[in-house]
Image (cartoon, rainbow, N blue to C red):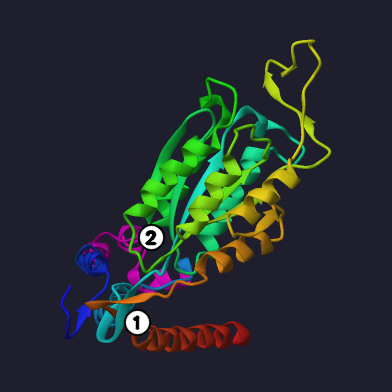
């Protein structure tokens, strides 16, 4: 794309101008092999308009109509091609905050005390974060008994969005949630980010972690400048955990286990991590609050000598005369109908 001067944003549309040639050839052929030309073998040409209710256009009239149509078609094609000739120069900025999402994919996240189930609701929350993201770099770590880096910290939210449908509790072979390993993986991702950025973690889980020393680990992260925010998914009333074939997870006495949202435990983790706690809902305020908290203390930095050009589209200069001509033709046909 040229940096200055007149050009088209979508030049592929200019191929539509090639349609003029076959249309011209078809019109030329139709003057000889048209319907009235065949009927002339059975009746006098002067009587054909009275017999058929139509008349054959003269060569000059056909040419004038073709040229009018060709002019309108050219205007339309050129407008679709997107003519441009001026632009605005915009400075590029680097986001001033990083957020690594720790997504719990343990079996308890399949419980359906929130609809349709906890994990699906968690994925929806991540999509909301991507949609509302005001300029925070985001990474994603999925964990259960083992933690896996799904996406490194990036400004491309679509790359994370494309990974979400594949995250399922069916990926878990061993029961349990080991948050400590996920915290270490996330800390490693943040270590490669600029020191001036605000470093944040977001835990999305139903809680119930049985690891010793977890709060101390979170306090250590907060002391090093990594804050932990928590988004609780589920309900305190709880729900059974499905294991397939219409069966539920049971304990050693074959009693159905009722998984409940461990809200007090999650709140303690958020407090230890100098972050905020929110329960997932459908209003969008939970994700907005987390993004505001993640952006605190971080400022976007201008990228030296990096600017982008935003071109001003000028297709409307061609669309306006096209619409005016078509409007005039429409009013003409209305007058002809009213006179009949």
| Residue 225 among magenta residues | no
Residue at the image position 75 percent from the left and 15 percent from the top: 251
> Mark 2 packing: few (<14 Cα in 10 Å), some, or many (20+)?
some
Q: Is residue 280 left or right of residue 213?
A: right
Q: Is residue 294 left or right of residue 96?
A: right
Q: Secondary structure at mark 2?
A: loop
Q: Quadrant of the N terminus?
A: bottom left
Instruction: Give the image location of residue 133, x and y in percent.
Output: 50, 64
Reading the chain from its start, which is encountered first: label 2 or label 1? Answer: 2
Which quadrant would residue 339 be assigned to in this image? bottom right
- In three-dimensional space, the C-alpha distance between marks 2 and 1, rounded to whole angstroms, equals 31 Å
Q: Secondary structure at mark 1?
A: loop
Q: Quadrant of the C terminus?
A: bottom right
Disc tally is 2
146 up-or-down from 99: above or below: above
Q: Which residue is mark 1?
A: 315
**Circles 2 and 1: CB atoms closer than 8 Å:** no
Instruction: Give the image location of residue 167, x and y in percent.
Output: 51, 36
Q: Residue furthest right?
A: 237
Q: Is residue 319 left or right of residue 12?
A: right
Q: Which residue is mark 2?
A: 155
Residue 274 visible: yes
54 up-or-down from 106: above or below: below
| Residue 48 among magenta residues | yes
> Mark 1 packing: few (<14 Cα in 10 Å), some, or many (20+)?
some
Q: Is residue 325 left or right of residue 168?
A: left
Q: Which residues are magenta?
A: 26-50
Tell me which secondary structure the magenta stretch mostly adopts.
helix
Q: Nearer the viewer, residue 175 or 282?
A: 175
Residue at the image position 59 percent from the left and 22 percent from the top: 175
Instruction: Give the image location of residue 109, x and y in percent.
Output: 65, 34
């Amino acid at each position: 794309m040229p940096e200055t001067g007149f050009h088209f944003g979508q030049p592929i549309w200019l191929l539509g101008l090639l349609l003029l040639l076959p249309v011209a050839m078809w019109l030329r052929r139709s003057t000889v092999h048209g319907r009235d030309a065949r009927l002339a073998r059975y009746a006098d040409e002067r009587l054909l308009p009275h017999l058929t209710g139509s008349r054959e256009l003269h060569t000059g009239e056909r040419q004038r109509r073709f040229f009018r149509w060709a002019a309108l078609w050219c205007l339309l094609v050129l407008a679709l091609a997107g003519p441009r000739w001026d632009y605005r120069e915009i400075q590029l900025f680097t986001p001033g905050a990083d957020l690594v999402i720790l997504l719990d994919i343990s079996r308890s996240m399949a419980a359906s005390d929130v609809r349709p189930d906890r994990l699906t609701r968690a994925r929806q929350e991540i999509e909301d974060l991507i949609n509302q993201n005001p300029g925070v770099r985001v990474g994603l770590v999925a964990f259960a008994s083992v933690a896996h880096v799904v996406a490194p910290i990036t400004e491309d939210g679509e790359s994370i969005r494309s990974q979400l449908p594949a995250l399922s509790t069916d990926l878990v072979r061993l029961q349990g949630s080991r948050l400590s390993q996920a915290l270490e993986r996330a800390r490693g991702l943040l270590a490669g980010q600029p020191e001036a950025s605000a470093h944040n973690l977001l835990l999305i889980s139903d809680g119930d972690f049985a690891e010793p020393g977890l709060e101390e680990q979170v306090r250590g992260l907060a002391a090093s400048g990594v804050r932990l925010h928590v988004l609780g998914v589920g309900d305190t009333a709880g729900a059974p955990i499905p294991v397939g074939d219409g069966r539920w997870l049971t304990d050693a006495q074959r009693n159905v286990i009722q998984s409940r949202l461990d809200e007090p435990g999650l709140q303690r983790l958020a407090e230890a991590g100098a972050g905020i706690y929110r329960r997932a809902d459908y209003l969008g305020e939970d994700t907005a609050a987390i993004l505001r908290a993640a952006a605190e203390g971080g400022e976007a930095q201008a990228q030296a000598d990096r600017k982008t050009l935003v071109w001003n589209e000028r297709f409307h200069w061609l669309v306006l005369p096209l619409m005016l001509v078509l409007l005039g033709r429409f009013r003409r046909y209305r007058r002809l109908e009213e006179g009949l």
